[in-house]
Image (tube, grey):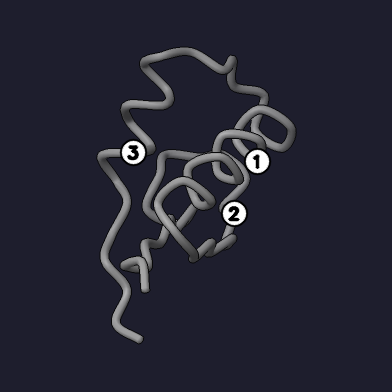
Amino acid sequence: MANRKAADCRLMPSEKNCSLYISGTAEEVLDTAIKHAVADHGHADTPELRKEIQSSLKDVDD
């Protein structure tokens, strides 16, 4: 079983005070978090954004 990871939008700088929490495999979370950042927060899908989100992923205890 793959280790679960999580992205917590509350931990990212935002004017929207977004509370989205995403968990799953690292690939699932990164993909969904990128889509969310672009669609809901107006970010461009750049290598820098991907790196920032990837570095913010936390391990999740099952």
Identify the residue at image location x=56%, y=17%.
45
Amino acid marked by disc 3 = Gln
Labels 3 and 2: the sequence-earlier one: 2
Labels 2 and 1: the sequence-earlier one: 2
State how far apart marks 2 and 1 are (Cα).
11 Å
Identify the secondary structure beneath mark 3.
helix
Amino acid marked by disc 2 = Cys
Q: Is residue 37 left or right of residue 57?
A: right
Image location of residue 35, percent across then percent down = 65, 35
Looking at this view, name the residue that lies furthest to the front: 1
Identify the residue at image location x=28%, y=60%.
58
Q: Is residue 13 left or right of residue 19?
A: left
Labels 3 and 1: the sequence-earlier one: 1
Q: Quadrant of the N terminus?
A: bottom left
Identify the residue at image location x=61%, y=45%.
32
Look at the picture and state if 26 lies above or below 44.
Answer: below
State how far apart marks 3 and 2 are (Cα).
18 Å
Identify the secondary structure beneath mark 2.
loop
Residue, disc 1: 36
Residue, disc 3: 54
Which residue is nearer to you in this view: 44 or 10?
44
Image location of residue 25, percent across then percent down = 44, 59
> Mark 3 or 2, which is nearer the eye?
3
> Mark 3 or 1, which is nearer the eye?
3
